[in-house]
Amino acid sequence: MFRNRYKRAVDFTALFHLLLICLLALSGAVYAQETGANEAGSQVTELDAVDTGEPSALQRAEYADSLWRRWMEVDADGVRTYWFRRSFEIQDPPAGGKIWLTADDDYSLYLNGEYIASDETEGLDWMNIREHDIGDYLVIGRNIIAVQVDDVDDTRHGLLFGMTYETIPEIETQLDRIVQRELDAQEERRLEHIRQQEAAKALRESRREPPSVGELRDMRVIEKNKLE
């Protein structure tokens, strides 16, 4: 019985798309946290999985971790590594997800402190967007995406990022939605029936001919008898 209910839940999988379109090139729509590679050293080359995506080096006050700037406004002296982060909540069990990503020049992608992938091409090939499957790394509750970008040639063209994920609602919630949809459909059919009846009545009344002389005489007689 439980298996059948679960299968039904999968059949009615609901899609919840998280659109995190981060267009930084030229627009400056996403903020990057900066640090000088010569100051932080090797501490910012990896994310610490224990603290779900927050690098220990950027937590220290001497590196001004509270300073967030648009990439296009950053003073490039000594700055070659950038971190981009975004958190989001998932209410139901995740069923899958994908990220589309490219950056100038090289990037490393992390989700919830887990390394996902890096730009595997050599050179400055940042014009091609790559797709990454993140279904195995999504969790119920708070999720944190982090992207480390190394701007090798200091051109600062930015980051292009897109993401969608899919969830399976809880069975009880799913059944409630199905029942509510059916109730809404029944109510709409009832209201449509009433509207059709009213329209038909209005049409009949508009087509009625004025009463004849005999009908008017009979109506007067009826009204007279009522008064007596």
Image (cartoon, helix red, strand yellow):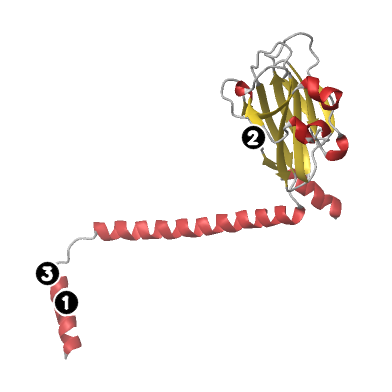
Quadrant of the rendered image containing residue 134: top right
- Dot 1 falls on a residue whose secondary structure is helix
* Front of the two marks 2 and 3: 2
Image x and y of residue 106, in percent: 75, 17
Label 2 to label 3, Cα distance in Å?
74 Å
Quadrant of the rendered image containing residue 28: top right
Q: How many numbered tags mark residues here?
A: 3
Label 2 to label 1, Cα distance in Å?
74 Å
Q: For the residue carrying disc 1, how many other residues have a C-alpha within 10 Å: few (<14), some (14-19), or many (20+)?
A: few
Residue 121 vertical placement versus 194 (above, below): above
Residue 62 vertical placement versus 26 (above, below): below
Seen in the image, is 52 located left or right of residue 128?
Answer: right
Residue identifier under label 1? 218
- Dot 2 falls on a residue whose secondary structure is loop
77 and 225: which one is in front?
77
Q: Quadrant of the C terminus?
A: bottom left
